[in-house]
């Protein structure tokens, strides 16, 4: 096996650098300039007639007839005459050989050798042109390869350049910030720009390598040294030769280790996992050079001007080789990783060892339970007047257990819940958030995971006292819902936002009787409109409770997920880990929805604003919140068929004199707080604004506003927009600069 190292030195030509001048026969040459070179410096000059300028990723290939002089060939540059020596092509090095064009950044000599051996064994690779990003390492790589030649490989040429080949504005590609699947990028500090080690940016080198080395190769496959084209007949070169145009598209499946013992020891063998929700990415190609059409241009992800085959081939991209780390969770959420039997088998057979595998996980016994005992876990603060209706309703539809966490209540909420606990109706706990560093809702859910009521439940949902499960199937009970989707173990209930229905004063009446105006079913904005909560069977597929859905997926159990939306349709795998809101593709109300009465009356909203939010304690529930949550565009009375069952259970609970007395005290406290707030100038003015004609009219127009309007608030809406209320086709938004930071 012959191993050569070559260095291509650029030249300063005044306005920038020229990478090479390559003769094309006769007087014709191709001049190659990196991405930093200004195109406006290229021009016809005496001694150079430009006939084409091709921009490739910002770099330039300029072709034309160039005169010879003592300094070499004239360049097509404005200003003083400039000439450079030719860089002679070496096409004979790869002529007639199945060849690879590959980039190297940090891959070790051992990895390079494994890569060569894989492609020689499985695809008949005979030669490789390696663009080495670390020029100092080229000689060491060559020495290592010569010491252990690879069977089947005739020649390896390692080329380095004297200019940085990375993107000037990016940090090292190896940094987790630049790993495409890395979690938590919004909390990372981006690395400082480092063009020596950043992602490859000089795309012009693909055409330069063609001109200098590869244009007479039998075939050229374009993948990096972290990439393995999948094995199996035919080889990639045979498959390319069989394709109509001699061009085969390649697409990557990113693969990962479950864990590694050390960064230095990481190899292909460790990569036995893939993302269960992953998609194909990183297009590359394999092609037959002499079958490319005239004018075809080599680029990283495609051959410009050539038609690829309709069906391509997969390659594996070994991500811990591109982004070395001892902590795999830095470059991919481990909740997304599943082992792949083919990877386990193939890597061990080809690289001599088996990588770490994920631990085995088992389903909880409740996963196979024949019962449907359902528990709601919730958090409350000063919700006294609304507890009884909420509990009665959900008992009426089939909820058996309630676990309620409270904090800092002043309206009798705690007393009511303690009383109901004493009577066996629910369990009440103090919220432990104060010393935990967590938000109240998150602290409550963390504590709830250790409660027998949660552990013994068949189904669990986290929801609030202003949310009501509205079942559309059967007789409106949970039993009917579970029967409609018997195989489901997760059911997402998409919100339908109910406004205040122009109700200003608080009265001790059923919410379900009073508030019937709501958002349209197709309500993509505001962002909160399609939030969902999830009934989850206690399967053990997830590690912990979550506000909108369970969190901490155990990916080993992902195949057991049967998650449906409110119409009983399957949720996509891409939603399994983090989704908390529905989309146009995933919303559905046919079987069930979640009526969300976020505002209630205008007077009650004063108390809610004063109280603050349970899960977002640092966010003011002011005018903007009222505006984006007050939807009065349509009417929906579907939940009212359950009012007789609600009334029966409510009256039964209220027949207990202690419960009745405490409910009355909560109502009185709520009324007193309203009166107290309305007596202040701040809340008097706020109340007048939210009950005014302008916001009342806007509450029927929200479907016509863009996201920025909801983030900026109602004050950005011009008065003339109010005249469009009767037009179904209008749309209004504001530019980003009008949205507060």
Image (tube, rainbow, N blue to C red):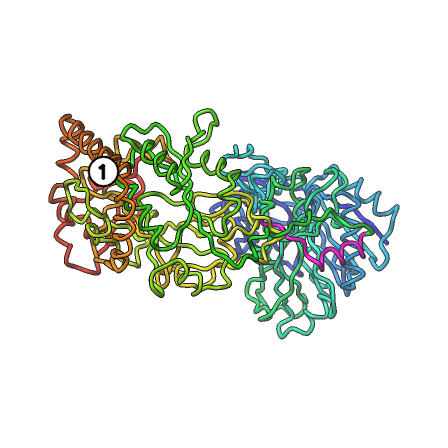
Residue range of the region highlighted in magenta in the rendering: 336-351
x%, y% of residue 731? Answer: 24, 54
Q: Quadrant of the C terminus?
A: top left
**Residue sitting nearer the eye, 450 or 119:** 450
**Is residue 528 visible in this depiction of the protein?**
yes
Horizontal relation, residue 171 to residue 665: left or right: right
Q: Is residue 442 magenta?
A: no
Q: How many marks?
A: 1
**Residue sitting nearer the eye, 395 or 434:** 395
Q: Which SS type dominates the magenta stretch?
A: helix
x%, y% of residue 17? Answer: 59, 41
Find residue 640 and report its image quarter.
Answer: bottom left
Would you name the residue on which mark 1 appears?
605
* Local SS, label 1: helix
**Is residue 709 visible in this depiction of the protein?**
no
Up/down of 701 relative to 108, above or below: below
């Amino acid at each position: 096996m012959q191993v050569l190292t070559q260095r291509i030195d650029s030249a300063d030509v005044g306005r920038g650098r020229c990478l090479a001048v390559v003769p094309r026969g006769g007087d014709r040459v191709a001049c190659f300039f990196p991405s930093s070179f200004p195109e406006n410096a290229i021009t016809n000059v005496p001694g150079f007639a430009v006939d084409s300028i091709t921009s490739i990723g910002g770099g330039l290939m300029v072709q034309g007839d160039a005169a010879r002089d003592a300094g070499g060939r004239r360049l097509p540059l404005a200003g003083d005459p400039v000439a450079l020596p030719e860089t002679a092509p070496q096409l004979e090095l790869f002529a007639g050989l199945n060849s690879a064009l590959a980039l190297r950044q940090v891959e070790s000599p051992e990895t390079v050798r494994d890569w060569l051996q894989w492609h020689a064994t499985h695809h008949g690779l005979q030669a490789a042109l390696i663009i080495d990003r670390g020029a100092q390492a080229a000689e060491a790589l060559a020495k290592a390869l010569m010491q252990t030649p690879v069977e089947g490989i005739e020649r390896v040429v390692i080329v380095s350049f004297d200019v940085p080949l990375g993107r000037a504005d990016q940090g090292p590609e190896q940094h987790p910030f630049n790993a495409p699947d890395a979690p938590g990028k919004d909390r990372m500090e981006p690395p400082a720009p480092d063009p020596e080690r950043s992602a490859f940016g000089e795309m012009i080198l693909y055409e330069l390598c063609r001109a200098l080395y590869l244009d007479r190769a039998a075939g050229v496959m374009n993948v990096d040294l972290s990439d393995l084209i999948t094995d199996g007949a035919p080889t990639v070169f045979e498959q390319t030769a069989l394709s109509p145009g001699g061009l085969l598209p390649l697409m990557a499946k990113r693969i990962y280790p479950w864990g590694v013992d050390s960064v230095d020891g990481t190899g292909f063998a460790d990569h036995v996992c893939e993302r269960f929700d992953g998609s194909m990415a990183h297009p590359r190609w394999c092609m037959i050079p002499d079958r490319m059409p005239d004018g075809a241009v080599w680029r990283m992800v495609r051959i410009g001007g050539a038609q690829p085959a309709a069906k391509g081939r997969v390659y594996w991209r070994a991500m811990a080789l591109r982004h070395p780390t001892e902590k795999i969770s830095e470059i991919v959420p481990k909740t997304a990783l599943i082992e792949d039997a083919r990877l386990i088998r193939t890597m061990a057979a080809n690289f001599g060892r088996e990588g770490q595998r994920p631990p085995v996980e088992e389903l909880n016994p409740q996963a196979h339970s024949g019962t449907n005992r359902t528990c709601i876990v919730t958090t409350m603060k000063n919700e006294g007047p609304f507890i009884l209706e909420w509990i009665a309703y959900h008992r009426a539809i089939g909820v058996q257990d309630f676990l309620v966490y409270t904090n800092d209540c002043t309206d009798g909420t705690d007393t009511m819940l303690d009383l109901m606990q004493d009577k066996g109706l629910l369990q009440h706990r103090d919220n432990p958030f104060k010393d935990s560093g967590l938000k109240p809702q998150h602290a409550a859910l963390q504590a709830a995971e250790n409660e027998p009521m949660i552990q013994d439940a068949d189904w669990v949902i986290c929801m609030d006292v202003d949310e009501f499960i509205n079942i559309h199937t059967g007789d409106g009970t949970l039993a009917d819902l579970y029967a409609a989707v018997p195989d489901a173990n997760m059911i997402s209930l998409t919100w339908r936002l109910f406004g205040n229905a122009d109700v200003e004063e608080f009265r001790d009446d059923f919410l379900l009787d009073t508030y019937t105006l709501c958002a349209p079913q197709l309500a993509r904005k505001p962002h909160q409109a399609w939030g969902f909560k999830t009934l989850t069977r206690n399967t053990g597929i997830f590690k912990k409770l979550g506000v909108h859905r369970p969190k901490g997926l155990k990916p080993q159990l992902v195949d057991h997920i049967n998650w449906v939306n409110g119409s009983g349709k399957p949720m996509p795998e891409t939603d399994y880990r983090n989704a908390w809101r529905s989309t146009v593709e995933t919303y559905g109300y046919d079987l069930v929805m979640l009526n969300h009465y976020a505002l209630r009356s205008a007077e009650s909203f004063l108390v809610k604003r004063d109280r603050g939010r349970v899960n977002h304690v640092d966010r003011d529930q002011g005018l903007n919140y009222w505006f984006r949550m007050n939807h009065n565009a349509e009417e929906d009375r579907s939940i009212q068929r359950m009012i007789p069952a609600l009334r029966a259970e409510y009256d039964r609970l209220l027949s207990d004199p202690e419960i009745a007395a405490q409910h009355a005290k909560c109502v009185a406290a709520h009324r007193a707080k309203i009166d107290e707030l309305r007596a202040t100038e701040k809340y008097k003015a706020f109340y007048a604004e939210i009950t005014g004609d302008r916001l009342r009219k806007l509450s029927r127009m929200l479907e016509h506003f863009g996201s920025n309007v909801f983030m900026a608030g109602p004050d950005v809406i011009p008065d003339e927009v109010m005249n469009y209320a009767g037009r179904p086709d209008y749309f209004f938004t504001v530019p980003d600069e009008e949205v507060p930071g």
